[in-house]
Amino acid sequence: MFKITGLIENNTKTLTWDNGILSGDKIALEKAILEDKKDHGSLGMVPSTTKKDYLLYETSAYHLIFQFVFDSILSQENNWTPYDDEGDY
C-alpha cells in the first residue's frame, strides 16, 4: 500500500494504491491512467521487474505515479518493510 499527495496545476491531489486498487482524486486518477498507456520503459527499475501495465503492480505503479502524475510531490507514505542494509540475506 502506498499513498502519494502532490500538486497538479497547483491543486493538491492524492492517490492511494492498495491491493491492486488505485483510488483518489478524479483528475489524478485520469492522469495516472493516461500515463499508464504510455511506454515509460523500465521507470529506472530493473527492466525485468517492470511490466507494460504499470498500475497493476505496486512498485511500478509507485514509480509511474511519483515520476509522471504529479507536478511536485508533497508527501508519500507506504507500509513497506524498511530496507536493512546490515541484515542477513
Image: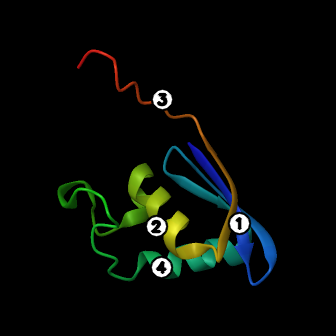
Residue extending farthest to the right is 11
Quick one: label 2 or label 1, which is nearer the N terminus? 1
Q: Which tag, 2 or 4, sits closer to the chain's start?
A: 4
Q: Say which residue label 3 marks.
A: 82
Residue located beneath label 2 in the image: 64
The tag earlier along the polypeptide, 4 or 1, is 1
**Which residue is rendered at x = 28% and y = 67% of the image?**
42
* Residue type of the residue flagged with mark 4: Glu
Residue designated by label 1: 6
Q: CA distance from mark 4 to mark 1?
A: 16 Å
- Residue that badge 4 annotates: 35
Q: In the rendered structure, which disc, 3 or 2, sits on the residue that comes first in sequence?
A: 2
Q: What label does residue 73 carry, if any? A: none
Question: Disc 3, disc 1: CB below 8 Å?
Answer: no
Counting from the top left corner in percent of width and height, residue 81 is at: 47, 28
Circle 1 sits in a helix, a strand or a loop, which is it?
A: strand
- If the image is split into quadrants, where does the N terminus sit? top right
